Image (tube, rainbow, N blue to C red):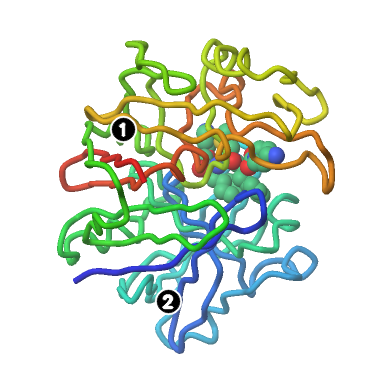
Amino acid sequence: QTGSANTNPSDSADDEYITSVSIGTPAQVLPLDFDTGSSDLWVFSSETPKSSASGHTLYSPSKSSTAKKLSGSTWSIEYGDKSSSSGDVYTDVVTIGGFSVKTQAVESATKVSTQFVQDTVISGLVGLGFDVGNQVSPRPQKTWFSNAANSLAEPLFTADLRHQETGSYNFGFIDTSLAKGTIGYTPADGSEGYWGFTATGYSVGGAKLNRNSITGIADTGTTLLLLPDNIVDAYYNNVESAQYDDSQEGVVFDCSEDLPSFSFGVGGQTITISGDLLNLTPIEEGSSTCFGGLQSSADIGINIFGDVALKAALVVFDLGNERLGWAQK
Ligand SMILES: CSC[C@H](NC(=O)[C@H](Cc1ccccc1)OC(=O)N1CCC(N)CC1)C(=O)N[C@@H](CC1CCCCC1)[C@@H](O)COc1ccncc1
């Protein structure tokens, strides 16, 4: 058995990627953000305060004949960008890309932070990290993918995120036609709940890869490519107008600049992110100053290969073999 779901950028900056998910009987369809950087499936619901819920699609467990309250269970989560949510837990059937998990923990939000209230393009998240990262207490729950893995043809999924066009999340199979290059595999470290891995080196502008390894996570729920300051500086030294903008909290430059590419080595392959994927977006509508897709990870404490990096590749999240595969697109 397999599953295949389309995913679409939320806006012109590819800030988030939205995938439709069916929950309950009859199906209630919600736009959710698939996040390999966390391990909870949570949704805006009939239990979310009305003042916070407006503009969002809601899950109503009372309208689903297959919903069951997981009594006594609660959840609370905070993300890297300081956004947060919390609530109680139901189980229900959850279908993604045609594949159904009958008894999936669906975490219902009774509280959401301002960022989520304002982010009306999504009505929750599907955590695709490792189960160890799940935030339900007293008994942590499994992710949708973990529940699905044993029934899928292969215990893996792939992410094919694209710049300003429809991409896909495929479950249980690898569509190698989505990539140009060979898939290079490297061990994945799931001990922290993330999909951790080590890149073997990097280069700017098509130069030869150096041997400075970078340990980080492959994270579909993070917009940017977040790396150490020395690498960020080495990159922007090639961009004449680049400067740090305090209000934007990142490096900005003239939108007319011809940005160099950025490459990293992984599993014996080289993944090259083109300059135009690294020129994210004008800082404001119509501005000629643009915000960089590569920014510093110094404040976070871990390096994050987010959507800016993932867009350059077909990425295989292989739970069965505890490994990550990367192929140039
Ligand atoms: C340093 S992890 C920052 C990252 N959140 C982002 O990447 C957000 C995503 C976003 C949200 C709302 C609108 C537009 C974009 O976007 C930005 O922060 N930016 C993009 C726009 C840009 N102008 C400013 C910077 C993050 O917490 N991800 C988590 C999932 C995320 C939570 C918020 C909703 C969307 C999904 C997750 O994978 C990683 O969790 C952790 C990482 C490290 N330790 C703990 C948790």
Q: Sequence-wise, which precedes: disc 1 or disc 2?
A: 2
Residue 159 in view: yes
Q: Nearer the viewer, residue 150 or 156?
A: 156
Residue mark closest to the camera, 1 vs 2 = 1
Query: Quick check: marks 1 and 2 in contact, CB under 8 Å?
Result: no
Q: Quadrant of residue 280?
A: top right
Which residue lies at the image location 49% right of the left edge and 63% below the top edge? Answer: 166
Picture quadrant where residue 263 is located = top left
Type of amino acid at the residue the image marks with label 2: Lys
- State yes or no: Cβ of the residue under disc 1 lies below 8 Å from any atom of ligand 1: no
- Where on the picture, by quarter, is residue 244? top right
Q: Residue at x 29, y 69 (%)?
A: 3
At label 1, the amino acid type is Ser
Q: Is mark 2 within 8 Å of ligand 1?
A: no
Residue at point 45%, 76% (across, down): 22
Quadrant location, ligand no. 1: top right
Rendered-image quadrant of the N terminus: bottom left
Residue sitting at x 35%, y 17%: 209
Q: Position of residue 103 (x, y in %)?
A: 33, 71
**Left or right side of 210 for 21:** right
Tell me the SS state at disc 2.
strand
Instruction: In the rendered structure, find residue 191 and report the number of the disc placed on it.
Output: 1
Query: What number of labels is visible?
Result: 2
| Residue 80 x %, y % | 58, 36
**Residue that badge 2 annotates:** 68
Circle 1 — which element?
A: loop
In the image shown, does 221 or 203 lie closer to the viewer?
203
Q: Is residue 134 above or below residue 51?
A: above
Residue 210 placement, left or right of 322: right
State the image coordinates of residue 130 (x, y, percent, origin top left): 33, 44
Number of residues whose C-alpha sits closer than 10 Å to that of mark 2, classed few (under 14), some (14–19) or many (20 or more): some
The answer to whether residue 82 is visible is: no
